[in-house]
Image (tube, rainbow, N blue to C red):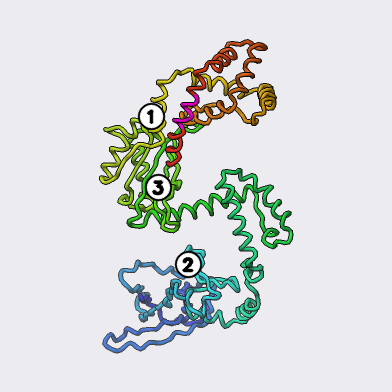
Amino acid sequence: MDKFVRRLPPKPNLTKVAEGEKSQPSTSTIPATPGITALSDSNPNSKLEPKIIRSSKTVATKEAAKTRPAEPEHPATSSTEQIDNEPGSDKESLVVEPPAKKRKQVYKFNDDWLSQSLFCKWLEKKEGKDKEPTAFCKLCEVSMANHKPVLERHMATTKHQTNACAIQGTKHIGDLIAKTADASKDQARRAEVKVTAFLAEHNLSLSLADSLVPFIRNTFPDSTIARQMSLGRTKATEVLTKVVAPACRSELISQLKTHGNFFSLVMDETTDVSTKKQCALSVIFYNKDTENVETRFFDLYETDSGKAEDLCEAMLLRLKNNNIPLENVVGFASDTTNSMVGQHNSVFSHLKENIPNITCVKCSCHMIHLVASKACSKLPSSIEDLLRLIGAHFSRSSKRVTRLQECQKFYEVEIHKILSPANTRWLSLKACVDRTLEQYVVLTEYFRLEMFEDGTSANVRIYEGLENKLTKVYLEFLSYILEFLTDFNKLF
């Protein structure tokens, strides 16, 4: 600490100053201050003995106070300040030592306190006013210094002990809620999952759950499980997408990830009604649990491009994201488009670059379809056209269907609907050929009446085709040969 030294004038004579006399310098004494000592410099070689100057009240006149010369101020040139007295006066000095200012100790919050049994039940780390973490008592809702003795003193307060005793008698909110781990309720949840899976497996609408579950409760009124079932279309959707589907997918992926469990991929791309390109993947593998070769749906995803490189990359990415080793993929099948099976820059060629030992084959169903279509091109096109005209005649008219049913009853033939061949699958022609042969006599008499009542060109053409003797021969041949192709197609 720096010391301040002042030179003081000699002790004044405390007498009244007469009027008219010349004012003398101020005779007031300086009040004593702690840490102030008077030093005598009369003998510089002698030891300076400190003297404590005690304060006393000075009596002086107003004139003396007004005429007192001002003490000149001198800038401090060193750690001490020295002021000279008047000439001829004794010299004294004071050493002023101001009190030392104590710096406030700053403590940081110790995270170990939160794990100590002494503080863990009530202590909390909370942000203080200065944005620094500070200790906070959850029971008393007060903040305190980050100092262990302070925490211990707070624990000993009456307020804290009272709050601690009160919180010990309070039950946890989890204990107030009844536990649902009841066997019957678990069985009810299990039944809900099974009903949802049943609807999805048989391709039924999930809105059926709104009527099915009340029907089950009404049918089995004595069943505790049925009474506790609660399933509607919204809950069925959530159960299917967040419970059933993830569980089935996880089970399938776990089998495909097994080293040595080889499988093949079947891929087909399509464009939905919103003109978005989608790819569907199926896997064919040996299920060790059921000991059978099974075909399972694997994934359905959208693609921005229909190029072979993009399709192959998107498919391999699905396998890598599920941590399925590419070494387990031994086969791949797809339709016969050039982007899929071409010799250069196709999905087949890109797959062989990534998986050298893979076997790529064209889809058997597509191949059989192409074979059947090419072979039947040698037959007259009027046969297929006749089947399409007959199907179109009954497709949008209930009146014509009713008249056909009257003819079926008259000739004592089973009342069946007339089928129309599909445009995308040529093998669907087999069912149409068999239905036409079954109703051949009825159709001939029906279009005979139609031609007389409504002699349009379509009705005349259909009747002439049915009257042709070779038409039935061709239909019998198609029914025989398409049966083999259809049975082969069912294997895949």
The crowd level at tag 1 (other Cα within 10 Å; few <14, some 14-19, many 20+) is few
Looking at the picture, how far across and down is residue 120, in whole percent? 52, 75
Query: Which of the two residues, 146 or 435, is positioned nearer the viewer here?
Result: 435
Kindly tell me whether residue 301 is visible in this rendering.
yes
Residue indicated by mark 2 = 133
Q: Residue at x 27, y 42 (%)?
A: 352
Q: Amino acid at mark 2?
A: Pro
- Vertical side of 154 occupied by 129: above or below: above
Taking the image as shown, residue 435 lies to the left or right of residue 184, namely left
- Mark 3 highlights which residue? 284
Q: Against 371, is 311 above or below?
A: below
Label 1 vs 2, first from the N-terminus: 2
Q: CA distance from mark 3 to mark 1?
A: 25 Å
Question: The residue tagged with tag 3: helix, strand or loop?
Answer: strand
Mark 2 lies on a secondary structure that is: strand
The quarter holding residue 112 reads: bottom left
| Placement of 130 over or under 388, stated as above or below | below
Question: Identity of the amino acid at label 3?
Answer: Ile
The residue positioned 64% from the left and 44% from the top of the image is 207
Give the residues drawn in magenta, as a range.
Answer: 475-482
C-alpha span from label 2 to label 3: 60 Å
Q: Is residue 342 left or right of residue 406?
A: left
